[in-house]
Image (cartoon, rainbow, N blue to C red):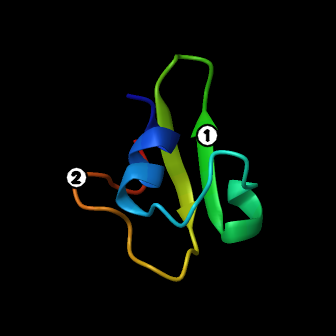
Amino acid sequence: MDLWQKIIKAYPEIKPTDDFRKLGIFLQDDGDGLAYIANWEYEKPIPEGLKLGK
């Protein structure tokens, strides 16, 4: 399951078509295939099991 899918599973009010950046969720992939949360400004905490940064 991709990172963005884990976030949507934790917060079903977020839709796959939403612009995560406008919600304050900044995901990043440095080209190594490992996506991570670069910045989290969403109104709710980072979902359990996920973390900020690599």
From the image, tell me which residue sits under label 2. 49
Q: Residue 45 is drawn in which quadrant?
A: bottom left
* Residue 13 point in image, percent of width and height: 53, 67
Residues packed near mark 1 inside 10 Å, few (<14), some (14 to 19) or many (20 plus): some
Q: In terms of depth relative to the viewer, which is nearer, 28 or 19?
A: 19
- Assign the N terminus to one quadrant of the image: top left
Residue 34 to residue 5: above or below: above
Q: Which amino acid, mark 1?
A: Gln
User: In percent of the image, x 77 and y 66: which residue is there?
Assistant: 22
**Pair 2/1: label in front:** 2
Callouts 2 and 1 close, C-beta under 8 Å:
no
Secondary structure category for the residue under label 1: strand
Farthest residue, direction bottom: 43
* Residue 34 point in image, percent of width and height: 46, 25
Q: Residue 28 is drawn in which quadrant?
A: top right
From the image, tell me which residue sits under label 1. 28
Residue 50 to residue 5: above or below: below
Secondary structure category for the residue under label 2: loop
Farthest residue, direction top: 32
Query: Horizontal placement of 41 versus 45: left or right?
Result: right
Q: Which amino acid, mark 2?
A: Gly
Residue 17 to residue 12: above or below: above
Q: Residue 6 is drawn in which quadrant?
A: top left
Of the numbered discs in the image, which one, if any, rests on residue 52?
none
CA distance for labels 2 and 1 = 17 Å
